[in-house]
Image (cartoon, coloured by chain):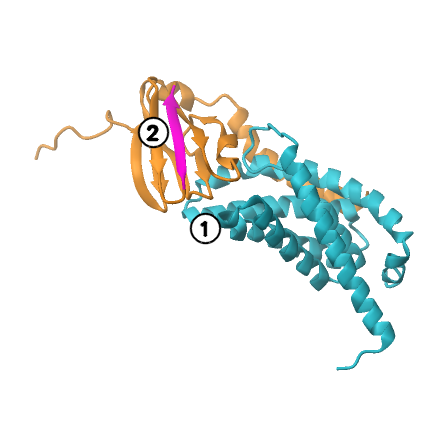
Chain colours: A cyan, B orange
Amino acid sequence: MPLSTEESTRMLKRTVIIAIFAAVAVVLSIVESIIPVNLQIPGAKLGLANIMILTCLYFLRGRDALMLVILKTIITAFIFGTFSSMLFSLFGSLFSFVVMFLVMKLGRNQVSLIGVSIVGGVGHNFGQITAASIVFQSSNIYYYMPLLLITGLVTGILVGIAVKYLVPSLTKLSLFEEFQINR
Amino acid sequence: MKRGDLLIIVIIATVALFFLVPRWLPGDESENNHNKLLTADITLNGKLYKTVELTKEEQIIEIKSERGTNVVKVHDYGIEMYDTDCPDKVCLTFGFIKKSKQSIICLPHRVMVEINGVQDVGDELDAVIN
């Protein structure tokens, strides 16, 4: 199918943005693994990579953000050598993506980026615990869910604030110029 | 911040506190269980690997599989993941557990430690006389 020049430039720009975001998300994951968080809460993490996923969801379409989520998960699994838990991590990320996408679609006027980010943080924790409970066929692991709701809430607010600062700065770049018109 | 955000925060915080607060309240279970030993089931790949009594004395159990090694340590009526060679080390963050229903999992190695109910010897029937 031949594309018009305008159309293909747009596609190219999307691809470039996804690639850059994936790279930044992976770097953020590495930075996060270096920061020692000694919370004594299993599975609790900052979720800095969600900054990029949420920003992508804001500028681009849902399927582009989905692509970013999958890319980021595969690359981090390569870097950390955690193939045995890659599917598990993908489950959390995908669940987080789906709830963020839905909340963004349904509650555009009622919910700001902070709310979407909170839902994403909590959704990630819920997805991971559910994956673990399926793998181990035990629901005892949900014992940690309430604590992870709280950590998801707090990290979600922090990530949301970061995205709130990032979006206006990116809007000034010419690469993102045409993607904000449809908002 | 919009109204929807506050609603989301309130709902999540309420649900979390609903489950957390009863745990913080001083329950009578810790008193009752004082002289009964709990047991912990260690499972590997979904199969029972070993059941241990959570004694005061120290016990060290090594769980070896083709995926790697986990070392759990029993002491002071509880159990903890002591060492592991798994890549993410999430299992070490579970800390020391000593209550029924608590668990430790190591996902990369498919190892799970679950504390079970009390090993109740007193309530069993001694004999039935017809």
The residue lying toward the viewer, choosing from A142 and A27, is A27
| Residue at numbered disc 2 | B61
Amino acid identity at mark 1: Ile
- The segment highlighted magenta reads B68-75
Q: Is residue B69 magenta?
A: yes
Residue B25 visible within the image: yes
- Report how many numbered discs are placed on residues in the image: 2
Residue A46 visible within the image: no
A70 left or right of B99?
A: right
The residue furthest left is B130
Residue A15 position in % (x across, y down):
76, 63
Q: Do the residues at pointers 2 and 1 share their chain?
A: no
Dot 1 crowding, Cα within 10 Å, few <14, some 14–19, many 20+: few
Q: Is residue A35 above or below residue B35?
A: below
Residue A39 position in % (x across, y down):
60, 28
The residue lying toward the viewer, choosing from A105 and A53, is A53
Question: At 18% from the left edge and 30% from the top edge, which residue is drawn?
Answer: B125
Residue A156 location, quadrant: top right
Question: At 46% from the left edge and 36% from the top edge, which residue is drawn?
Answer: B85
Residue A182 location, quadrant: bottom right
| Residue at numbered disc 1 | A134
The secondary structure that most of the magenta stretch takes on is: strand
Dot 2 crowding, Cα within 10 Å, few <14, some 14–19, many 20+: some
Residue B56 position in % (x across, y down):
34, 17
Amino acid identity at mark 2: Ile
Question: At 83% from the left edge and 67% from the top edge, which residue is drawn?
Answer: A10
Work out how far the residue at label 2 is from the one at label 1, CA to CA, in angstroms: 25 Å
Residue B115 position in % (x across, y down):
38, 32
The residue lying toward the viewer, choosing from A71 and B91, is A71
Q: Which chain contains the residue that carries disc 1? A: A
